[in-house]
Image (spheres, coloured by chain):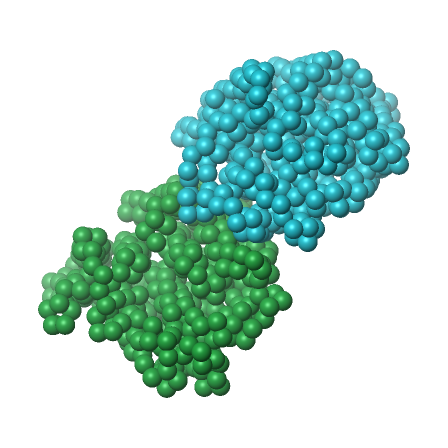
Chain colours: A cyan, B green
Amino acid sequence: MLAWTIYISFIGVLVLMLLPKGNAALARGVALLFALAGLGLGIGGFVQYKSAIAAPGSDKILTITNADWISALGIHYHLAADGISITLVLLTGLAAVAGILFSWNIENRTKEFFAFYLALIGGVYGVFLSFDLFLLFVFYEIAIVPKYFIIAIWGSTRREYGAMKLALYSFIGSAMVLVGLIAAHVVSGAHSFEVGELAKYSYSLNFQMWAFPLVFIGFAILAGMWPFHTWAPTGHVAAPTAASMLLAGVVMKLGAYGCLRVAMTLFPDGLAHWRTCFAVLAVVGIIYGATVALVQKDFKFVIGYSSVSHMGFVLLGLMTLNVIGLSGAVLQMFSHGVIAGLLFAVVGRMVYDRTHTRDLDDLQTMRLSKAIPFAAVTFVIASMASMGLPGFSGFAAEFQVIIGAWSAFPTLTILTGIGILIGVAYTLRVMQKAFFGDADPKPDEIHEPFAPITAPERIGAVLLVGVSILIGLWPRLLLDIIVPSFDSPLFDWLRRGK
Amino acid sequence: MSFLELFQLAVPETIIVVTALLILIVDVVSMRDLDLRFRFIISGMIACVGCVGAIAWILISHTHENAFAGMLVIDPLTQFVKIGILALTAFTVLLSMDGDFTDHVGEYLALILLATVGMMFLVSAEDLLMIFIALELTSLSLYILTAFNKRDIKSAEASLKYFLFGGMSAAFTLFGLSLVYGSSGSTNLPEIATALAGKGLDPLLIVAIVMIVIGFGFKVAAVPFHLWAPDAYQGAPTPSAAFIASGSKVASFFIFAKVMAMAFADREIAGSGAWHGYVAGWVPVVAIVAALSMLLGNFVAIVQTSVRRLIAYSAIAHGGYMLLAVLAHTQQSLSALIYYALTYGLTTIGAFGVVAMVERGTGGEKLTDFAGLSRRTPLVSFCMLIFMLSLAGIPPLAGFFGKFYVFSAAVNSDPSDLGLLWLVILAVATSAVSLYYYLQVLKQIYVTNPATATGPIKPSVLTQVVLALLAALVVFFGCFPGFLIHGL
């Protein structure tokens, strides 16, 4: 059933391409239908997985298909899911639906926009559900091209530059992964690309010492690890709203997922040697992202850098190598995906599409809390969630990461606390400047009242806020599938290390 | 072996020769005064029927034969490559039917078919003399094909450069081949291998191998023998350029790999290009050539404003990747090479078809002439999307799997040592760079709006069908490469 999330997205692309040009409403409706179908299938898969792991003796992995594909190289069309995959599939479904709702006002080349969008979603679903590393790589690269076109055609500031930078960074990252993948396949002598098979072979330490950082950094580029994060702020700002939501919300998680599923699973000994280095880089990312966000003049850049900062938590959690930290990292992937989506939706759709400016000083004069109160309320709630206030998903996730990190890297954990404080600072600053500023407007800047918040925007905002509160109050909903995943044979290395 | 038996082995080639002569006769005798497009269609159809007939004959005749000690070798692999070459020829002919660059339709198509005959004999040859004869037949036909647009001086210039360069390289090749004969006492490839085994690298053999690498390097447009390629691709009429880039590349790479792997397989002659395990031989030489091709091809393509020159420099880069498979000289790498070359041929013919269509529609083939193409011809633009992404190596297209297979085979040639990994890393890195300039073309097509308001372009139904078919094949062979590899 879960495999249909992928197929339905690509079928949606075909259907959209065949629709008549110029009928934007039809294109939107069709796209929304397919995205909702994907989300529904994701929820179905969630239920299916929960019942599967309840059975005694289950290896905590739900195999979906496993067919011979290219037998000359031992490549199989192997789709499977564990709790981590399903969490991220759910996130993708939510981000897809919300993104389409927040793109309801696109009139220029609408059906092409949604065609590229669904192609991106399909590729992302594929990455999360592939257990054959060749197949994972295929879907990973499929996701690169639609990103380029969405940003280059429908984006705003420096869109062609931002799109090309993002595409090239992603492609270079995947090139690094390709080298590591081929080397691992050849050295192991396994006639297979299945992640479990490749992980069983114990690679020499010399090999792992260079293969692990190669593959990890290749994926971490997409996850926005400092100092390879520079594509992220440029790309997010250049992208149209739905793409920013998807980029920060889901695509950056592709990188983190790849780090966990591929780099850490295949090369645990290399991981043991490199983990302190990457944990330090993660914390640098948290503090650097937050500090740079503090001084930005452009509203969207603040959110872009905050994404880099929040992804630092994910990477720190991955480096803790204990179940609490790792499950916190996965939960943070989900939580930040929802919250980042919400933040970009407010900045892009609710504010920029109406005010046509993202400069914080200009926004100060517009009294947005009175002009578009729904946007202000949504942003305040999103800010609470982003700062890590209890009751929202961000708190549950970051709390787990910090507890996990404390046992592994106490000093770094204290520095992370400083990062959280700076996070509060930039969030409150941007909230005050954008919505609650009360500077007087210059005489020539008086404008007509803004368009009211439309129904799709309201639905999207309620959806995302609702999910964040749901997971914030009941994180067990997701943790009940994430934590058992670490009992699967794929994480034997985790238990061996004890 | 009697002449009749030999003739039975060479039926496909004979079919093509007869078709070529038939087209010449039909065109010269009866069609000189008719409309150009009508002549192209009739002659083109005859050519396609001939190609299909030859493919059909190859498919139904299963033979393993070796005529006259390597002059004509029939085995499943060579037959498969021949089918591939015939298919590429058929596609080239189909795409040339829209052309208006020449009045000499019969001569043009006959030359294409004669070049195909040369390629077919080339892949069947395991004898040095036969290799040279077939190489010359192909090359001479291609020189003339490049010059066919008599109304454009660039065509004549391109052909002259190609011919002078090619003639010189043929001289190098022949001298090298004769030195090999001198060293080994035979012109048959397996016999050469046994004669040279254990003798090691003596100076005469070194000179011979270097000359052969020069000769073949010219044919596949490898650095530093690539200087003819950008001008030839830019000046030649589009179908000729497509033909040079596709069929000729397949045949040249196949025979290059065969000669090096069969005649010079001995460890002492081959040497090793491993990172820390350098051993003198032809492998490190070809490794340097491959590395230079990848670097130069990709980096110079970045600054091109003409799409044809961009494709030419990218062809040099792709030649570098394919040379990776040549220097790995294992069974798997040969299979990877053929897969890559055939799918690359299909993609390039498609790309040139789109370029030809844009030239007819807008009068030029600069990047700016492609602006806004997706709004003017959605279907053809989508096909170009597939071709460009396949060349860049984006899955699930054939170009991606070709690169993956070649890189895997190169690393796999030395599993214990991963010696060629440095070259694979270079290949992957330059491949990442290549995405930039392929996206530049796609940016013009999809993102940029044309400078002046322009209406839709309506390519002929034939062009649309052929391009769609080529794009479908690229996607199909990318998603299910087993179908092609199975034949290898």
Residue A70 picture location, percent across and down: 42, 43
Quick check: B150 left or right of A367?
left
* Residue located 60% across and 47% down the image: A177
> Is B129 situated above or below A157?
below
Query: Residue A161 location, x and y as percent?
Result: 64, 46
Q: Is residue B29 left or right of residue A367?
A: left
Placement of A248 over or under A60, stated as above or below: below
Q: Is residue A103 above or below residue B216?
A: above
Residue B237 on image: x %, y %: 35, 63
Looking at the image, which is closer to me, A454 or A257?
A257
- Give the residue at x 65% y 33%: A492
Q: A139 and A163: which one is in front? A: A139
Q: How many numbered marks does the figure carry? A: 0
In depth, the one of B132 and A458 nearer the eye is B132
- Residue B259 seen in the current view: yes
In the image, what residue occupies the spot 48% across and 71% down? B267
Q: Left or right? Give the position of A242 relative to A63.
A: right
Q: Quadrant of residue A285?
A: top right
Q: Residue at x 87, y 30 (%)?
A: A417
Where does the image place residue B281, in percent across and percent down from the top left?
Answer: 51, 75
Q: Quadrant of the C terminus of chain B?
A: bottom left
